Image (cartoon, rainbow, N blue to C red):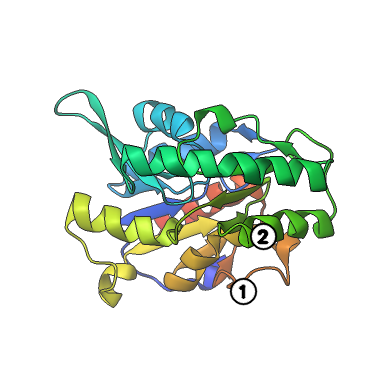
Amino acid sequence: MKPLAQMPRTRIATVFTDIDDTLTTDGKLSAQAYEALEELQRAGMRVIPVTGRPAGWCDQIARLWPVDGIIGENGALYMWHDAGTGKLRTRHLLDEESRAGNAARLVEVRRRILQEVPACAVASDQFCRQYDLAIDFCEDVPSLPHEAVERIVRIMEESGMTAKISSIHVNGWFGDYDKLSMARLMMRERYGLDLADGAERLRCVFAGDSPNDAPMFAYFPLSVGVANVKSFSGRLAHEPRFITARPFGAGFAELVRHLLTRH
């Protein structure tokens, strides 16, 4: 990972960013990080959070935050607030019947995880999820050892699920989508842009901090880890190309200052 200062000069059109421990600090969204989002929009850049957080959170974020849309539940859906109609719009990857069928299958996986890894817990935001099962390993429970987290991943994978580790949860779902696949779909459907185009990809930046961000780190030449990404050293399938000096939301604000001096 190279220092952020070595990121090449290019005109950025879209900033994708993770939320937990990328925008937030100790679970809180600071004024500094929120202001950084507003500064990007004022500069004419498209701002799209890409998160493992649930649909219920995405509803609020799409309505109230200075963003152009949001990808949620690790790529299961995207939302945006339609300024023309004043309505929230949602693009689901699966239809309602498929979502209901998968939800029933999650019940048994949930039971097994809680039985075999009793120190973990179902994430407190599970009630507003539509696609996945989120298991908390450090947000509202004492931090679990790496071995316990990996055990949760194995149970999900043995059950036929895709499992990804964020900075706070293990998320599991049925299907092969991820943050990147939905980012590509959203850009094509909402903006008519093909991220397979290398030139278009160079007009995008992605900021993240954890293993579930690895597909985005790998795909975007201008991928940035906030400094706390180093806590996952050796556990990232793909590392970001660049890294900030500061962690968490302060690192994101550092990235925004860097972008705005080159925009």
- What is the x, y in percent for residue 114? 76, 41
Q: Is residue 263 visible?
A: no
Q: Are marks 2 and 1 in contact (CB under 8 Å)?
A: yes
Q: CA distance from mark 2 to mark 1?
A: 10 Å
Residue 123 picture quarter: top right
User: Where is mark 1, residue-wise?
Assistant: 1
Q: Amino acid at mark 1?
A: Met
* In this view, 82 is above or below 238: above
Determine the residue located farthest toward the top in the rendered image: 86
Residue 160 left/right relative to 81: right
Q: Quadrant of residue 225?
A: bottom right
User: Which quadrant of the view contains residue 82?
Assistant: top left
Question: Tag 2: Cα neighbours inside 10 Å, few (<14), some, or many (≥20)?
Answer: many
Whether residue 213 sits left or right of residue 145 in the image: it is left
Q: Is residue 151 visible?
A: yes
Q: Position of residue 146 (x, y in %)?
A: 81, 58
Residue nearest the observer in this picture, 250 or 94: 94
For the residue pair 101 and 239, the one nearer the viewer reads as: 101
Query: For the residues carrying marks 2 and 1, which lies nearer the camera in this image?
Result: 2
- The kind of residue on which mark 2 rests is Val
Q: Work out which quarter of the rendered image holds the N terminus and state it.
A: bottom right
Q: Residue at x 36, y 55 (%)?
A: 182
Q: Residue at x 54, y 73 (%)?
A: 241
Per the image, the residue denoted by label 2 is 229
